[in-house]
Image: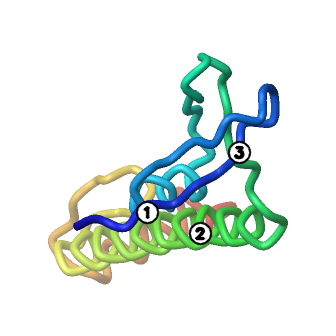
Amino acid sequence: MEAIDVTRCCACGTDVYLPRQRMADLRATGNTFYCSNGHSLHFRPTALEKENAALKRDVEAMRLQRNKAMDDLAAEKRRALANTCPHCQRGFQSAHGMRIHKALKHRSAA
């Protein structure tokens, strides 16, 4: 048998019985649920839960930033191996020709 948790409606005082897992999900998400009299209820996240959510968003943003940087680096390596100018994508027969081109055409980018 599934464990049941109880909470009380702040509007009418009616007990609201929900399965423990559902109650945990509602506490974690802050989604709205209703008492038997139709009053909408929700749990407010604690300060630690808010901080945890903010840190998770920061970690995900940093992960995306790192992945983009790694993709950019891989593209730069492929261009360098192919003797392609990273600024204008012009191809060259040798790395020496590309270095001369970059020195003459892309001084400000170097």
Local crowd size for mark 1, using a 10 Å CA cut-off: few (<14), some (14–19), many (≥20): some
SS class, disc 1: helix
* Vertical side of 34 occupied by 88: above or below: below
Q: Disc 1 residue type?
A: Arg
Local crowd size for mark 2, using a 10 Å CA cut-off: few (<14), some (14–19), many (≥20): few
Side of 75 where 44 appears, left or right? right
State the image quarter where residue 78 is shown.
bottom left
**Residue 104 locus on image (x, y percent):** 54, 63
Local crowd size for mark 3, using a 10 Å CA cut-off: few (<14), some (14–19), many (≥20): few
**Residue 88 locus on image (x, y percent):** 39, 50
- Quarter that holds the N terminus: bottom left
Question: Residue, x 50% and y 47% (percent of image)?
Answer: 17
Q: Earlier in the sequence, mark 3 or mark 2?
A: 3
Residue under pointer 2: 56
State the image quarter where residue 84 is shown.
bottom left
In the rendering, which numbered label is found on residue 8? 3
**Residue 103 locus on image (x, y percent):** 54, 70
Q: Earlier in the sequence, mark 2 or mark 1?
A: 1
